[in-house]
Image (cartoon, grey):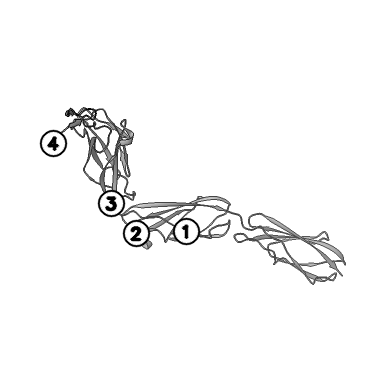
């Protein structure tokens, strides 16, 4: 059969007089699709060191996909996965060309390539197709900082252990190969893969670990937690003998008083109920009542965080 090109053979169904030739046009190429438009990118050079300063020039050519005519005055929106661009958008010149620069990221950026994206705008949004160009990035491996802490809900005054052994370099445990610097979030710092720290006040703390690798690269990780105060103190005491005899010594023992982990009992204040008192830093205190009778003895304990607790007992002296 002979190829009719853009002409079509049209037969009338109304008459039997025959057929005629009718010219037809192909649909126009419209919209910045991969078929209707030609957008090409090139990076010179296509490899950069991760030094924060080296640059690659990205060259853009934008043309009509069917006629190869340059598309001038067209907006192109730019983005990159690594590094920085000289502009967020460019416009093509009369020859359909545009250019911009990519500045390499710092040595601490964990990327082996920068993917630069160019997106035409102002066209048929449904047909927009972005184009990409890759710029390889060279540099030493960047460590991945990671750490745990124990206990998981730390309290004031308790030892908190920070462990950075889960940090890695090139997919392997960093271990002694790396250095470890800590910011504990309370104005103090430390070094080492495994460290302990004691907090002296409650509140939210942001702890930052910075891991340094042999190639000079570093990476940081931050975790937050809320420091709670330890369990408040509880005052308790015994008297031996339980019913003392006047003019004979009795022992008041507050050793059963308690306070939560992270605090200690700093002071014991006794009121023996006979107008005599005693303040000590140890839990055991001797007492001799001068006369028989019934006395109300009161113990007040103060912990290292300044919190207090009180216990009262009736003491019968024979």
**Tag in front: 4 or 3:** 4
Other-residue count near label 3 (Cα within 10 Å), few / some / many at <14 / 14–19 / ≥20: some
Residue sitting at x 35%, y 58% = 169
Give the mark nearer the N terminus: 4 vs 3.
Answer: 4
- Nearest to N terminus: mark 2 or mark 3: 3
Label for residue 148? Answer: 1
Q: Quadrant of residue 285?
A: bottom right
Q: Which residue is mark 4?
A: 3
Side of 268 relative to 40 (left or right): right
> Element type at marker 2?
loop
Does residue 50 show up?
Answer: no
* Rendered-image quadrant of the C terminus: bottom right
Quadrant location of the N terminus?
top left
Q: Is residue 317 left or right of residue 191?
A: right
Mark 2 or mark 3, whichever is nearer to me: 2
Q: Which residue is mark 2?
A: 171
The tag on residue 139 is 3
**Between marks 2 and 4 in the image, the one whose residue lies nearer the viewer:** 4
Mark 2 vs mark 1, foreground winner is: 2
Q: Of the residues under marks 1 and 3, which one precedes in the sequence?
A: 3
Whichever of labels 2 and 4 marks the residue nearer the N terminus, that label is: 4
Q: Nearer the viewer, residue 295 or 54?
A: 54
Badge nearest the viewer, 4 or 1: 4
Please determine whether, in this image, residue 52 is positioned above or below residue 182.
Answer: above
Using the image, tell me which numbered label, if any, was put on residue 61: none
Asked whether the residues under the numbered discs 4 and 3 touch, taking CB atoms below 8 Å apart as contact, a structural biologist would say no
Residue 54: percent from the left, percent from the top? 26, 43
């Amino acid at each position: 059969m002979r190829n009719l090109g853009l002409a079509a053979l049209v037969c009338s169904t109304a008459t039997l007089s025959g057929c005629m030739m009718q010219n037809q046009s192909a649909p126009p190429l419209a919209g910045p699709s991969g078929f209707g438009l030609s957008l090409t990118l090139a990076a010179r050079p296509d490899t950069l060191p991760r030094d924060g300063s080296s640059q690659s020039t990205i060259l853009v050519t934008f043309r009509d996909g069917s006629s190869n005519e340059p598309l001038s005055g067209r907006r192109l929106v730019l983005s990159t996965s690594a590094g920085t661009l000289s502009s967020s958008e460019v416009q093509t010149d009369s020859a359909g060309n545009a250019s911009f620069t990519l500045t390499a990221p710092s040595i601490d950026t964990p990327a082996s390539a920068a993917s630069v994206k160019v997106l035409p705008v102002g066209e048929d949004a449904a047909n927009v197709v972005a184009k990409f160009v890759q710029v390889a990035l060279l540099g030493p491996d960047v460590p991945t900082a990671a750490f745990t802490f124990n206990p998981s809900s730390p309290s004031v005054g308790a030892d908190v252990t920070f462990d950075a052994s889960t940090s890695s370099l090139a997919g392997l445990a960093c271990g002694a190969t790396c250095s470890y610097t800590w910011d504990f979030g309370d104005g103090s710092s430390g070094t080492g893969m495994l460290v302990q720290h004691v907090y002296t006040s409650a509140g939210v703390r942001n702890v930052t670990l910075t891991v340094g690798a042999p190639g000079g690269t570093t990476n940081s990780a931050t975790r937050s937690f809320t420091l709670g105060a330890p369990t408040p103190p509880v005052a308790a005491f015994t008297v031996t003998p339980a019913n003392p005899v006047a003019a004979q010594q009795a022992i008041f023992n507050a050793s059963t008083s308690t306070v939560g982990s992270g605090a200690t009992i700093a002071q014991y204040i006794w009121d023996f109920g006979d107008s005599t008192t005693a303040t000590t830093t140890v839990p055991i205190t001797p007492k001799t009542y001068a006369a028989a009778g019934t006395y109300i003895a009161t113990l007040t304990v103060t912990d290292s965080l300044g919190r207090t607790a009180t216990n009262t007992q009736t003491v019968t002296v024979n």
